[in-house]
Image (cartoon, helix red, strand yellow):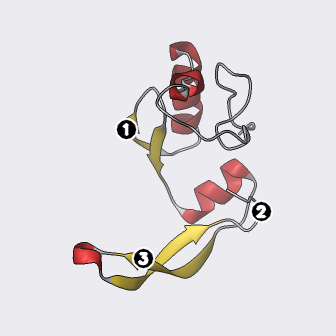
Amino acid sequence: MRSPRRARLGVSLFESGLVVTSDIVGNFVSDEAATERAVGLLADAGFEILQVTAFMINIAGSKGQYEAAFRTTIVAEERPTMKQQGIVEEATYFDTPMSPV
């Protein structure tokens, strides 16, 4: 897989350094053709496509699929998480130490 597709501003939402508000969020929408290409690449890599919107593509796959497709390592981390009724409990998150996002 290649690096994240750049949105209309020419930078990724995560790399922009901007505080994203309702006034500028539309600048981070990818064009439809780019989204369709990304969905095809993800499906070809074996991911299940769960949801596609103008802002994101939600996918599911195995740890191995993620590591191979994105050339990264996935680790499990326990983090405090606010659950129902405002109760904070530990939850397992899967993340990569190779990215600040």
Residue 72's spot in the image, x, y percent? 74, 59
Q: Amino acid at mark 3?
A: Thr
Q: Amino acid at mark 1?
A: Gln
Rendering quarter of residue 84:
bottom left
Residue name at image x 51 percent, y 72 percent: 93
Residue 35's spot in the image, x, y percent? 53, 24
Could you give the CA–CA distance between mark 3 and mark 2, rounded to whole angstroms? Answer: 22 Å
Rendering quarter of residue 52:
top left
Q: Secondary structure at mark 1?
A: strand
Q: Nearer the viewer, residue 92 or 85?
A: 85
Residue 57's spot in the image, x, y percent? 48, 37
Residue matched to label 2: 98
Residue matched to label 1: 51
Q: Are marks 2 and 1 in contact (CB under 8 Å)?
A: no
* Rendered-image quadrant of the C terminus: bottom right
Residue name at image x 67 percent, y 39 percent: 18
* Rendered-image quadrant of the N terminus: top right
Q: Assess disc 3: are there few (<14), some (14-19) or many (≥20) residues with their C-alpha within 10 Å of its C-alpha.
A: some
Could you give the CA–CA distance between mark 2 and mark 1, rounded to whole angstroms? Answer: 25 Å
| Foreground: disc 3 or disc 2 | 3
Label at residue 9: none
Label at residue 81: 3
Q: Earlier in the sequence, mark 2 or mark 1?
A: 1
